[in-house]
Amino acid sequence: MKLALIFVIARYFQRRAHNGGYRIREILYPLLLTLLPAALLVKQPDLGTAFLMFLIFLSMVMFAGIKKRSLLILFLSFLMAFPGIWVGLKDYQRKRILAFLDPYHDPLGSGYHLIQSKIAVGSGELWGKGFLKGTQCKLQFLPQRHTDFAFAVVGEEWGFVGCTLILALYLILILWGLHTATKAKDRFGSFTALGITAMIFWHVVINVGMVLGMLPVVGLPLSFFSYGGSSIITHFIGIGILLSIRARRYLFTP
Amino acid sequence: MGRGVWRSLNYGILILVLALALLGVVNLYSATTASGGSFPFWQRQLLWVAVGLFLGLLAFSIDYRYYEVFAYPIYGTFFLALLFVLLKGTFGGGRSGGSLWDISISSPLR
């Protein structure tokens, strides 16, 4: 769905090229395209993915360029919607956000994930405990250690150095993706490349932020790294398309 | 299409992504050695990476302008699938997206 959303938004901006920033009226249609599936995802409930779709939309709009006034309106309407979102959240989702603000309020319940994750990462120190030597993860203190919290295992066993190396790989990938977006032959390729890069970027930021306790637990996997067929397949297809845009920048005349 | 495209494939990035995925498998091996089972997580993940690589190369081989042409059919299909999974979860009594759908339909939606 994320890739499909990127295609339709890119198509929209391909067909609506003009100089200067876009007005709020012009981005209402891609906003609608984003909110329809996002609403279904919220119902599912998969709040993380719904939020990610919104971030992809926002990234692509920023790339397109938007009038300052329109950006302000968008920001203010989001602020105004916030109490509504808070009321609409399910009880456990509100708990997760409160747990993020103060994990020790309920250390065995809603704060448990965050505390265990931080203990695992922190205990790795600079060089880590070594492969297969992690105790927090081995003894199953840390839930979800194979999927969303896989990065905590890296932190424990490979330490700060291991985490930095992995993040450096993501940095290279994202910079290359941005470069692809600027070098693409047509606007559709450009916007698609940016959308896919944004998808990877936000996955990494939100996942790592969550593992380190800098963001609330929203349940997004780490791109290419976490266990799970869905995430792996979506990301590999995304990379395939990025490579395709990159490879075809000389091949045809538009 | 043809051979020209494969010559322009950026193998550096492909290797980087595969390295990340394989590090993920190695990490998974460490994270789940205590769990065991006849079909351990890391082997399943290795299978997913192989499937992902195949589909990724398939996506690469298609001229990306086709994604523009078929943007709405693709979007519509996923949207309906999402709606279907949700309705099934609501009226089927179970949690949204049963184990069967986790793989076949709700997976590519993430």
Image (cartoon, coloured by chain):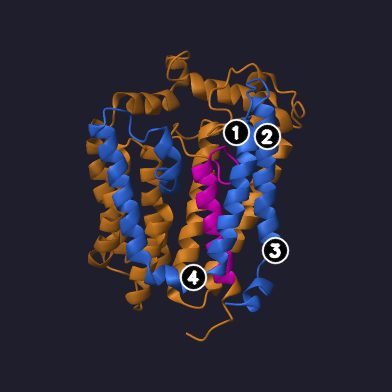
Query: Which class describes the residues within 10 Å of circle 2: few (<14), some (14-19), or many (20+)?
Result: many
Specify whether A21 is left or right of A246.
left
Q: Secondary structure at mark 2?
A: helix
Q: Earlier in the sequence, mark 2 or mark 4?
A: 2
State the mark number for residue B27.
Answer: 2
Residue A127 included in the magenta stretch of the image: no
State the mark number for residue A150.
Answer: 1
Query: Which class describes the residues within 10 Å of circle 1: few (<14), some (14-19), or many (20+)?
Result: many
Q: Nearer the viewer, residue B64 or A39?
A: B64
Q: On screen, B95 above or below A221?
A: above
- Give the residue displayed 57% in from the left and 68% down from the top: B61
Q: Chain of mark 1?
A: A
Answer yes or no: are tags 4 and 3 on the same subunit: yes
Per the rendered image, the range of residues in magenta is: A222-246
Q: On screen, A87 above or below A39?
A: above
Q: CA distance from mark 2 to mark 1?
A: 7 Å
The residue indicated by pointer 4 is B64
Q: CA distance from mark 2 to mark 4?
A: 34 Å
Which chain did the renderer colour blue? B
- Residue A63, x across and y down, in percent: 43, 65
Query: Which class describes the residues within 10 Å of circle 3: few (<14), some (14-19), or many (20+)?
Result: few
Q: Residue furthest bottom?
A: A253
Q: CA distance from mark 2 to mark 3?
A: 24 Å
Q: CA distance from mark 4 to mark 1?
A: 32 Å
**Circles 2 and 1 in contact, beta carbons < 8 Å:** yes
Answer yes or no: are tags 4 and 1 on the same subunit: no
Q: CA distance from mark 1 to mark 3?
A: 26 Å
The residue indicated by pointer 3 is B11
Answer yes or no: are tags 2 and 1 on the same subunit: no
- The amino acid marked with disc number 4 is Tyr
